[in-house]
Image (cartoon, grey):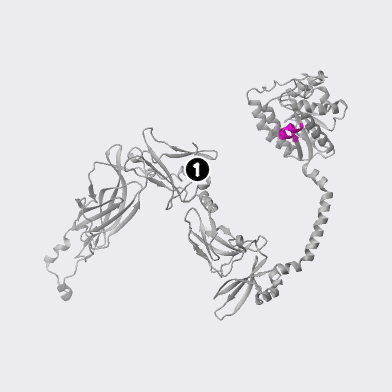
Amino acid sequence: MPVPWFLLSLALGRSPVVLSLERLVGPQDATHCSPGLSCHLWGSDILCLPGDIMPAPGPVLAPTHLQTELVLRCPKETDCDLCVRVAVHLEVHGHWEEPEDEEKFGGAADPGEEEPRNASLQAQVVLSFQAYPTARCVLLEVQVPAALVQFGQSVGSVVYDCFEAALGSEVRIWSYTQPRYEKELNLTQQLPDCRGLEVRNSIPSCWALPWLNVSADGDNVHLVLNVSEEQHFGLSLYWNQTGPQIITLNHTDLVPCLCIQVWPLEPDSVRTNICPFREDPRAHRNLWRAARLRLLTLQSWLLDAPCSLPAEAALCWRALGGDPCQPLVPPLSWENVTVDKVLEFPLLKGHPNLCVQVNSWKKLQLQECLWADSLGPLKDDVLLLETRDPQDNRSLCALEPSGCTSLPSKASTRAARLGEYLLQDLQSGQCLQLWDDDLGALWACPMDKYIHKRWALVWLACLLFAAALSLILLLKKDHAKAAAGGRAALLLYSADDSGFERLVGALASALCQLPLRVAVDLWSRRELSAQGPVAWFHAQRRQTLQEGGVVVLLFSPGAVALCSEWLQDGVSEPGAPGAHGPNDAFRASLSCVLPDFLQGRAPGRYVGACFDRLLHPDAVPALFRTVPVFTLPSQLPDFLAALQQPRAPRSGRLQERAEQVSRALQPALDSYFHSPGTPAPGRGVGAGAGDGT
């Protein structure tokens, strides 16, 4: 069953780096240390009680750095567990205290006092390991010889093998000495899952997990799990959200918080969670397409979106006329947005031209004019921005696409020309106050009454100009139509088989790329069926010739046979018994064009053509050779020249156009002559065959 397109990214993002792990045989814990040190495991499961920090009595060993390595503990070849090896690096901290007598009198200390200074150091190092749902503490005893005891210098490390942990879990490790002389070290690490480890055949819970692949089939995607027949597995698609969800998934449901969970159906199996769309541009585009702003009250609104996302919002003013919405920052400011949390703007009144812009990562993602639904469409109002300084001095400017124009002003903008009237409206209370605080205010002032008076004559002049222009265009309509469309060409052919019809369609499409208006029954099957073949071809021929166009007779072995039959017998008329089949349309066209050839009206109005390797021109009946017959594509330049307007000069681009048509036609020719059942090259109708006159 095809899976919706949203799973296309279930190739699970980029392939992780696969780690090959060392194997430890046997279940016993072990410890080893750097050369020169001696160490052993004192206790493998002790009670973790760090205790308080105590002052060091002299030089002590202190943990300075924690280092981890993943290994496999394997009681059997194919039954392993993930294990964390921990190395604790140690240094000598502290110093010997000087004896008070030596400090006070400057004398030498008792030689018996020197012996502790040359003694080795010993420490008990605690490792505390937590990884849900387990927690362990081990005690390691380390001894450093006197030769290595140098204050502030590293003496080496002690390594513990090892703490078992679950795939994909988060582990926390602490280390300190007992008694504790310094603050404990700590390390938090996220362990990889089966996809990042070379453990497919070693850890049973990984037998199914990493082998998830995706194959595309058009808009559908197949999710493939490469597991053995005896392996049972479970698969879960879920939203990385809280609370119950009802989910109907299609390709638009691919969003950053869409995650996948997969696990084997075994007791206490590890579940691998993968969220591959967090950085996917398509997922972020879908997220913003689904996001909506919703107005709750005059001042409060919220953002609806499928996922939580970092965003900020601000008000903007959208003027009538399609200009970009201009952010009102300052005097207002950007506000952080939380999905599904009610936000407020300090507005006094709403206005249809006020909109909300939402930015994410400094890019505009969403813009909606929330008040337009309740207050109507955009108004032709201008927004006045009033600013106040600490001394209560006030200034006004009008917000325009070019910026904020000070009022009064001698600039040439619309607001500047009407600045005096706008100030009068503001003082008389005709402007609507939208916002007010200590720093300034926003006012919306109507402009339509000034525009109507000032531009009435301009509109009248524009209407007169538009009427005159329409009259001129109407007079030149027919000429412009003919010049733009090129010469009309009606293409007639015999539908020998479906392959030949595709070849005719390719030729017609290629000719349409030139200044030609091509008509062919392939593109008008509905009209042909409704009107009947005779009526349709008669109407098309008459229209083409009345417009000064040309009729193209495309000869094939089937067309030659029908022409010869018509000329010799003259009984197979369209619609007569026995005249049914795929060639009925060509029979009907013969009844329309034959009188022109018999009465000598064909030259200049008709041309013939046939395809190389399919038909020799001499095979065309003599009556139809009274007009030029070209072979294609070898004689394409001459063929295209014959399709030009009768007195049109031979274009210098004719060869270029011929090459263009040849390139478009060649794939169809190759397909036709290499398909089964097609006459081999040189086996078409030869010269003289079927000459009915």
Is residue 193 among the parts visible in the rendering?
A: yes
Q: Which residues are magenta?
A: 519-531
Examine the image and state in which quarter residue 385 appears: bottom right
x 74%, y 26%: residue: 494
Q: Is residue 652 above or below residue 381?
A: above
The magenta stretch spans residue 303: no
x 68%, y 35%: residue: 664
Residue 59 as seen in the image, left or right of residue 535: left
Type of amino acid at the residue the image marks with label 1: Leu
Q: Nearer the viewer, residue 298 or 574?
A: 298
Examine the image and state in which quarter residue 520 appears: top right
Secondary structure mostly seen in the magenta stretch? helix
Quadrant including the C terminus: top right
Q: Is residue 352 above or below residue 430?
A: above
Label 1 belongs to which residue?
8
x 76%, y 68%: residue: 453
x then y, percent, for residue 348: 57, 70
Residue 405 as seen in the image, left or right of residue 285: right
x then y, percent, for residue 130: 29, 53
